Image: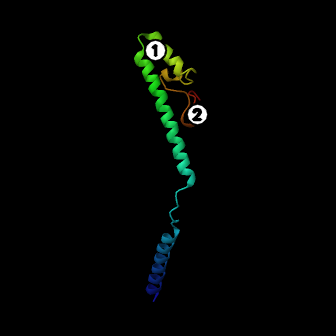
Amino acid sequence: MVKAAIAAAVLSLALAAAAFAVEGNPPAKAPDANFEKRQSDVLKMIDARIARLQKEKECVQAAKNMDDLKACREKFHPEPRRDQGNMNRQDGPQGGPRGQQPPQGGE
C-alpha cells in the first residue's frame, strides 16, 4: 500500500510538472511595429557608412604619396583616435572588460 501511494505521488508530480511546462511557455509575440522602423533606420545608417567608406577608399586610391594619404586621413577622420596610443603597448590597451583597470602588481 505504501508503494502504491509513493507511485501515485510520483506520477502526479510528473504529470503536474509536464502540464506546468506546457503552460509555462508564453505564446509567440506578433512582430513589434517598432522593429520595422528600427530595422529601416539601421539599414539607412549602414548605407550611409558604406558611402562614406567608398569616398575614403577613392581618396586613398588616388593618393600618390604619404602627404596625400595623410590628407585623406585628416579629411575623413578629423579627430585623433582616442585609443591609438594605448594600442602599441606590450600589454594592450589599458583597462579590462567594461573599462575596469587591471590589478596593480606588488601588493
The quarter of the image holding the N terminus is bottom left
Q: Residues within 10 Å of mark 1 (few under 14, many from 20)?
A: some
Residue 32 position by quadrant: bottom right
**Residue ID at (53%, 50%):** 36
Left or right of 11, for residue 37: right
Q: Which residue is mark 1?
A: 69
> Is 25 in front, or is 60?
60
Mark 1 and mark 2: span between their CA atoms?
Answer: 32 Å
The residue where tag 2 is placed is 99
* Residue at point 53%, 22% (across, down): 77
Classify the position of the C terminus by image quarter.
Answer: top right
Q: Amino acid at mark 1?
A: Leu
Residue in the picture at 46% in, 83% down: 8
Q: Depth check: give the residue in front, 44 or 71.
A: 44
Q: Residue 103 falls in which quadrant of the image? A: top right
Q: Nearer the viewer, mark 1 or mark 2?
A: 1
Mark 2: secondary structure:
helix
In x, y percent, where is residue 85? 53, 20
Q: Which secondary structure, mark 1?
A: helix
The residue lying toward the viewer, choosing from 49 and 103, is 49
Q: How is the image coloured?
A: rainbow
